[in-house]
Amino acid sequence: MAYEVLARKWRPRQFDEIVGQEHVVTTLKNAIESDRVAHAYLFVGPRGIGKTTTARILAKALNCVEGPTVHPCDKCDACREIAQGSSMDVIEIDGASNNGVEQVRSLRETVHYSPVRGRYRIYIIDEVHMLTTPAFNALLKTLEEPPGHVKFFFATTEPQKIPATVLSRCQRFDLRPLTVKEIVGRLEEICAAEGFDVDQDALLAIARSAEGSLRDAESALDQLVAFCGKKIREGDVMAVFGMVARRELEGLGKAILTGDAATALETLSRFDRAGKDMNRVLEELLEHFRNLLVYMETGGRKAEELLPAQSAALADQAALTDVEKVMRIVETLIEAEQKMRYAASPRLLLEAAIVRACHASRVVSVGELMKRLEQLAAAVAGDAASAGGGITAHRSATRTPATRSAAAAGGKGGKDGSYRTADSVNREGRAAKIREKPHSGDDCVLLSEHWSEIIERVGRFAPLAPGYLRDAKPLRVEGSKVVLGFDREFSSEPELINIPRNRKAITRVLSEFLGREVDIELRILDARDTLPADIKTSELDAAAGAAKQRAQNGKSSATGQSSCKSHPRSGRKQDSLATRQKWMQNGTVQKILEAFGGDIVDIRA
Ligand SMILES: [Zn+2]
């Protein structure tokens, strides 16, 4: 006997065998039992979820010799012919083929003939939205005044393409994509009956790849059996479909949630080495966070759609985060998904997106901010009542780690050691500070951290550029402008690099990396650029206007930009230190600094 594909062999024969469309099945059964079957039905939904199968079972239910019945016998001639597609009374038309249009035209002539054997002449038109306008017009005439013995069952993936005049004459049923759990359940039945040995992780992987389509899942199982034989493990599915193992994916999700960019990038690089498709990784990552979001928003109630292993991992991750953070991560990933199609290097794009998502997970949410503000207000009010006292002790106990480590390093600018000079900012403190900052200020740090990678990438488009870029470094990111600095000794290099081809390559790679269009400015480093480092790590960014003013005053500039300099503070700011010092003693200022883990950057009249 010829091999029959699983999707065909296991096609449901009874209403009760249809998976996941209870709402449709119940309504249809009620209509049959109460003898109120409409003359036209429209089944809507994505591919492979049972639209035409439902239509065929409904046809059997109406034409079975024991019918109309909700349990067609599957034994009588009518049932068997419908199952084989050879019934004279059930005419299947594929709207997508040219033939379909012809068939609809001839439909008008044949529609008035009585059924040959059964009770009804049933027209099942698949992909009905593909019919041409003349075909729809022909159909409409019949739909307006159908003879009593005629039924129309339409199926479509794109109902919006069907004329309203046709839609309004149909009873519409929307079939939904199947959940992973439903697909796994059905595959388990099939495997048990067919004698396949497929473990649950492998079934889960097949179900995930099928995106709600049972037929796709069954075809995938067919393909795997052909490749691997009857024993299938998760690794086989990964290898055949270029997917990522569930646990690895969950690990990546967790790294992003905890803001652990190093682990996230390491995982991604492992995927890349294993030849995984970056598009696919991104899709699966999005699906993971979508599940997490639904899980959190419904308090785990939607867990019945998930397998136990999945919901355990989601519960674990839900405890690590809040909905707002997951939303931001999802937004970041969706943004990347939209750019993925045009990306020259999907891996670079995904890496940048993951780093950004890691940052997004660390940003303090509005809710948290409000909570801190309320605490702050209460604290300040309390201080006013008790007229100060004990503030210093309280502060040193609650300062952020960054400031604490700076304090431990012993800043020479402050009596109490809590005021940080550039000398006192050790690397650890800086790293902690950077992590706390919102991403706009981190772009420059991000570029610095990946500078060699960026140079290498630029080299692919402009082979000569890397030679010059190695002597440059990202100085700051000002909105859509990235300023690259060259040391004085390489003062001829900006000119050499500033040819269109190089510029284009650099802006392209930087834009890709930052996920937005940016331009570059090339600059020779001068005294102005040797600015104190603690300015950039401030939470309270000074406005650009003030920066300009200071520049005009012959003092420093570029405060409030995302500057990458790390030179020690120069002595000329000493006079303003005293003023800062004074403000640092102020109880309310201290409270504000504590609440936001901030620092004083600038004092203006
Ligand atoms: Zn029958």
Image: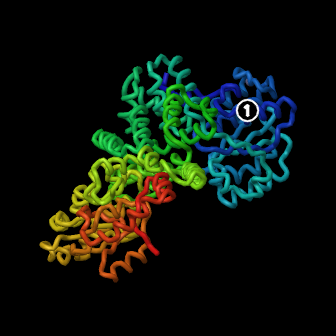
Q: Is residue 64 left or right of residue 241?
A: right
Image coords of residue 209 (percent x, y): 47, 37
Identified at 55% across, 35% down, the residue is 215
Q: How many marks?
A: 1
Estimate how packed mark 1 is, as few (under 14), some (14 to 19) or many (20 or more) residues with alpha carbons within 10 Å. many
Q: Which residue is mark 1?
A: 25
Q: Residue at 80%, 55% (x, y): give it.
A: 141
From where the camera sits, is residue 272 visible? yes
Mark 1 C-beta to ligand 1 under 8 Å: no
Nearest the viewer among 32 and 148 is: 32
Where residue 230 appears, as percent x and y from the top left, is: 41, 21
Front in this rendered view, residue 422 or 161:
422
Kind of residue at badge 1: Val
Give percent across and percent down for residue 312. Answer: 51, 28
Instruction: Report helix, strand or loop for mark 1.
Output: helix
Q: Quadrant of ligand 1?
A: top right
Residue depicted at 27% across the width and 68% down the height: 531
Q: Foreground: 339 or 600?
A: 600
Q: Residue sitting at 24 percent across and 68 percent down?
A: 570
Q: Is residue 500 left or right of residue 382?
A: left
Question: In the picture shown, does residue 331 fall above or below 193?
Answer: below
- Depth check: 97 or 380 in front? 380
Q: Is residue 275 visible?
A: no
